């Protein structure tokens, strides 16, 4: 595995130089004196391949090391990184390598089995964004419900309601039950709500892979506006255009391990070398 010449010294550690278990690297883009808004230290989480396997009763009283592990595997293991305020970081890797799992750990949706992740600011999560919407409620009621669950007051929702509807281009359907909308319309509504949150950290998981061309361009513009306003972006995507467009830094995951943490162009170069036929 060749190391790009643009990364030397401390950054080479992320390529597996030296101790292969020491994959921690600091961001080359920001002042070390800043407090990170996302900090992961030796992060790891295990899953089961077969839900049919069950632990025995005595496992409840055993130490973690002695406990039986029925077909468990490490979805992520020994992941360490810091993200500074205003940084845009893209997560790269094949399907099933732990990218979305890492995003969910940062969002606090799931908890790690080892290590820790600390998020110092509020989060606007574009992760499975249509989740939480209620089929029997109208579009209007769903907007108030979902925005409220993300911390907006009723007054704030009312102030931003017209902007949400205009962005989603959903005006004729605001009193239509949510269940009658197309999948594309549901994504447009969900993105429009989350994009109006004022949280400093934006988590994005492949949301731009859905929707028509015009709406995607609106999403690109909105994300750039948030980045330009100093928001922190943490994004999972298979689209190199999105990653190069939004991100200055990348993190490449393979088999649940971190291969490289460095400039996004170098991360994508190494990923393409590894998996381009």
Image (cartoon, grey):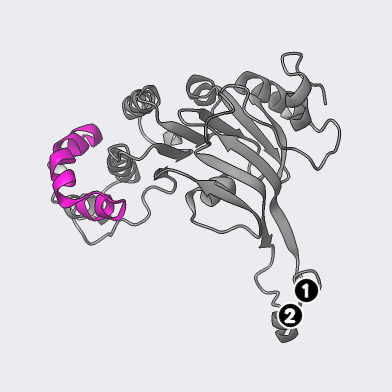
Towards the viewer: 116 or 97: 116
Task: Give the number of the disc on residue 47.
Answer: none
Q: Is residue 277 visible?
A: no
**Is the stretch drawn in magenta largely helix, strand or loop?**
helix
Residue 61 higher or lower than 239, as above or below: below
> Callout 1: helix, strand or loop?
loop
Q: Position of residue 195 (x, y in %)?
A: 32, 37
- Quadrant containing the C terminus in the rendered view: top right
Q: Secondary structure at mark 2?
A: helix
Percent of width and height locating residue 204:
46, 38
Identify which residue is drawn at 13% across, 45% down.
Answer: 158
Could you tell me how far apart the alpha carbons at marks 1 and 2 are, in whole angstroms? Answer: 6 Å
Residue found at the far bottom of this picture: 57
Q: Which residue is mark 1?
A: 68
Residue 166 inside the magenta-drawn segment: yes
Question: Given contact means CB atoms under 8 Å apart, are the residues at marks 1 and 2 in contact?
Answer: yes
Q: Quadrant of residue 69?
A: bottom right
Name the image quarter holding the N terminus. top right
Determine whether, in the image, residue 120 is placed left or right of residue 163.
right
Give the image location of residue 58, x and y in percent: 74, 85
Q: Which residues are magenta?
A: 144-169
Residue where numbered disc 2 is placed = 59
> Percent x, y for residue 51?
65, 70
């Amino acid at each position: 595995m060749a190391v790009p010449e643009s990364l030397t010294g401390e950054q080479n550690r992320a390529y597996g130089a030296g101790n292969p278990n020491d994959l921690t690297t600091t961001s080359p883009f920001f002042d070390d004196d800043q407090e990170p808004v996302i900090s992961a230290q030796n992060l790891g989480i295990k899953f089961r391949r077969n839900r049919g396997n069950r632990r025995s009763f005595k496992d409840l009283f055993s130490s973690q090391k002695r406990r039986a592990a029925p077909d468990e595997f490490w979805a992520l293991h020994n992941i360490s990184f810091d993200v500074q305020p205003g940084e845009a970081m893209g997560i790269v890797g094949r399907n099933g390598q732990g990218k979305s799992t890492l995003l969910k750990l940062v969002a606090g949706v799931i908890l790690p089995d080892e290590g820790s992740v600390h998020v110092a600011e509020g989060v606007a999560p574009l992760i499975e964004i249509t989740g939480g919407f209620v089929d029997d409620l109208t579009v209007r009621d769903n907007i108030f419900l979902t925005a409220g669950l993300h911390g907006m007051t009723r007054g704030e929702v009312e102030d931003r309601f017209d902007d949400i509807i205009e962005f989603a281009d959903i005006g004729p359907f605001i009193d239509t039950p949510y269940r009658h909308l197309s999948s594309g319309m549901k994504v447009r509504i969900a993105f429009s709500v989350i994009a109006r949150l004022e949280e400093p950290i934006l988590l994005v998981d492949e949301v731009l892979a859905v929707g028509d061309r015009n709406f995607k361009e609106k999403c690109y513009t909105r994300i750039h506006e948030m980045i330009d306003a100093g928001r922190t972006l943490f994004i999972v995507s298979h689209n190199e255009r999105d990653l190069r467009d939004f991100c200055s830094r990348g993190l490449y995951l393979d088999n649940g391990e971190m291969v490289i943490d460095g400039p996004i162009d170098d991360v994508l170069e190494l990923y393409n070398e590894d998996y381009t036929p």
